Structure formats: C-alpha cells, structure tokens
Amino acid sequence: MDLIKIGIIGAGGMASYHVKGFTQAGANVIAMADADISRARAFAASWGIPKTYAGLGEMLKGSPELDAVSVITPNKFHKPLVIEALEGGKHVYCEKPPALNGAETAAMLEASKKAGRRLMFNFNNRARPEAQAMVNYIRGGKAGRINSAQAVWIRRAGIPGFGGWFTAKALSGGGAMIDLPHMLDLALYFMDYPEPDYLLGTAYYDFMDNKAFKGPWGIPDSAKGVTDVESSCHAMLTFKSGQVLMIRSSWAEMNERETAAVTFQGTRAGGKIERLFAVDGIDETSADICRIFTEEGGNQVDLAIKTPKDESMGRIANAANFINSLTKKEKPLNTPEEALVLMKIIDALYKSAASKKPVQIK
C-alpha cells in the first residue's frame, strides 16, 4: 500500500505534533501551507517537508496527489477550509474546536458525508494512555452505569494573550469554554455520548483586561485588538437518559492551580483522570492521576491505574490514529457526529449564559 500523503495548513504551535503523529503512523507529510509563506517555508525546512504554499487552494492545485489535509488555523477558518478540502476529495484532520458553532459543524459533517471522506478532530485527550485505560475499564462494564460526571479545565492565570484571535469572538467563537473543550469531550466519551437535554450555565468576563492573568505561551498582545470573550464559565447539563454532567472551564479564575480533570460516579465504580499543573500551561510541570473508586468484600477500595506519562497529552497519538483509521488499522477515536453534539452543548452554554435561563438542546 502506498503511503498516505498529507498536507498541513497552518504552521502554528500544534503543527509539530501533527507531523510527529502522521509520520509515526507511516504517512508522508509532503506539503505545508500558511498565509505567511515565510513561516510555511521555515516550518517545512525544519521538518523536511518538500512543498510550501500560501493557501489551501494553491496546495490542492499544486499537490493533487494529497490524500488528506490537516487544518491548524484560527477557529473562524475551520469550516471553509475543511469543506474546501473535503470537496477537493481529501480526508481531513482538524484542530479543536470543530468550528465557531454547531451550525458550522453540521455543515462540515454534511460535507464529509457527501464527499465520502473521513473527518476527524484533535480531541487529543481521548488518546492519552490513562484515558484509554479508563475507557477500557468503563466499556468492560466495571463501572456500571455512569450516573454523573464532572468535567473541569480551570486555570489560575492562563489567558492566551490580549487582543489576538483567541480573545476576539469573531475569530475564536468564544473564550475558555470553546478553547478548552477537552474535558467536556472526555466526560461525554466516558459516558458514551448520551443525548443532551437541558443546560443551565453562566459565563464571567473577569480579568480579561488584567495582564497579570496572561498565560506563559508568549503570544503577543495587540493593543488594537478585541477582548470580548469569557474568562470562565460554569454549567450543569442533563441528558435524556437521566445522567448529569457538571462543567467548569476557565482561563483566569481564583483557583489554586491549573487542573484538567474528569471525575465520574458509576453504579459499580467511580473514577478520576486528572492532570495537575505546577505552572499554568506548562505540561512539563504536570503530574497525572488515574484512579478507580470501588467496593470489594465490604471494603472501600481505591485503585491506581499505572500508565506511561504522555507529555503531548495524546496529541501525537490522536494524529497517528487519524492515519491508522484511513489505513483500516484502527477505528477513529472520534467522529464528526460527536463533534456536532459537543458544539450544540457549547452553543447552549453561551445561550443560557446570555439569557440566564435553562436551554433545551435539540
């Protein structure tokens, strides 16, 4: 079988993880495109990528042999680029969040069906070793029915710059919730993506003008830019199955430290996956926890699941899974149908926060 040939659009910080994952799975990254052609050339040179382009259209025309395209751009451009690539006959791997909202995600899903091509997203936390160990435990029936769960990604000081695309709703779609959807997705994954019913939520905009709450990534501020997204949000979500999920997400809040965690309570066992950061946003300072809480022989028992630490938080493994799903070696770890459910939940959170009323998700 010929190697899968893939091109990447967007030479941002996530691009190196995509290259590592694609090549680990045996694909050949042959093209890089970026609106800043000098950045595309610099990235391509550092990774031995032979072709560079200034945009997706140019890349599709110049490299018709491509089997797939990876999209790593500001959120506003996900929908048009994904649909253009799908209509060009390419499979697509896209960074999170899927799009600005559910309507855009629905259009992407429809385009993938019409084209008959794979569409996957970088919900990388599913691919973490401890997440896979936990989901195997759950799917094996050892947790029973998961009645409730809590999805938390909170930072103390983690605003990704001021006035850039992250803080401009027209470009990003939102703030902490849409930028950090991973624990929400992971909780839904553990719960087997039940059908959502009602959501009651609120959003806060505290600290969005305070640079003491900026994260450590070195993203430059823009004095003329916009800062109109939330710094934190909180919500309760119910499902038609009777299950419930609590959601907490923040870039800046008076928390002890950055925490990314899913905790669940089942009829046979509960569990928790957690990454605790000593310094907000720096994976190298983090510690991972993966535990089961159950009962055995009349005793309350805690079990520690031991897995290798993955500093990439599954980013490399998830990109590799995309390639392996194309070659039929693995099933895809996520689907566009699930992405649409996720984005409908996020839409409902913003709607509920604005109206201060519960929202039914349809």
Image (cartoon, grey):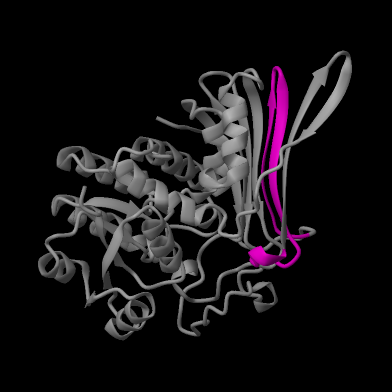
The answer to whether residue 329 is left or right of residue 316 is left
Q: Is residue 135 above or below residue 356?
A: above
The image quadrant of residue 210 is bottom right
Image coordinates for residue 293, horizontal then vertical, percent? 77, 29
Q: Residue 261: within the magenta? A: yes
* Residues shaded magenta: 257-285
| Residue extending farthest right | 299
From the top left corner, tell me how far across and down residue 65 is, in percent. Answer: 14, 60
Task: Please name the residue shown 27% across and 43% down the image.
Answer: 118
Establish if 356 lies above or below 63: above
Name of the residue lying farthest toward the top: 297
Figure check: 202 above or below 49: above
Relative horizontal placement of residue 53, taking residue 181 as reference (left or right)? left
Residue at 15% across, 67% down: 57
Q: Dividing the image into 4 quarters, which one contains the C terminus?
A: top left
Q: Position of residue 175 (x, y in %)?
A: 52, 60
Between 150 and 238, the residue placed more toward the observer is 150
Note whether residue 122 is visible. Answer: no
Depicted 218 relative to depicted 184: above or below: below
Residue at point 46% right, 78% down? 225
Please say whether residue 41 is visible from this viewpoint.
yes
Residue 47 at x, y percent in the picture: 37, 75
Q: Is residue 91 magenta?
A: no
Q: Find the residue positioned furthest to the front.
A: 1
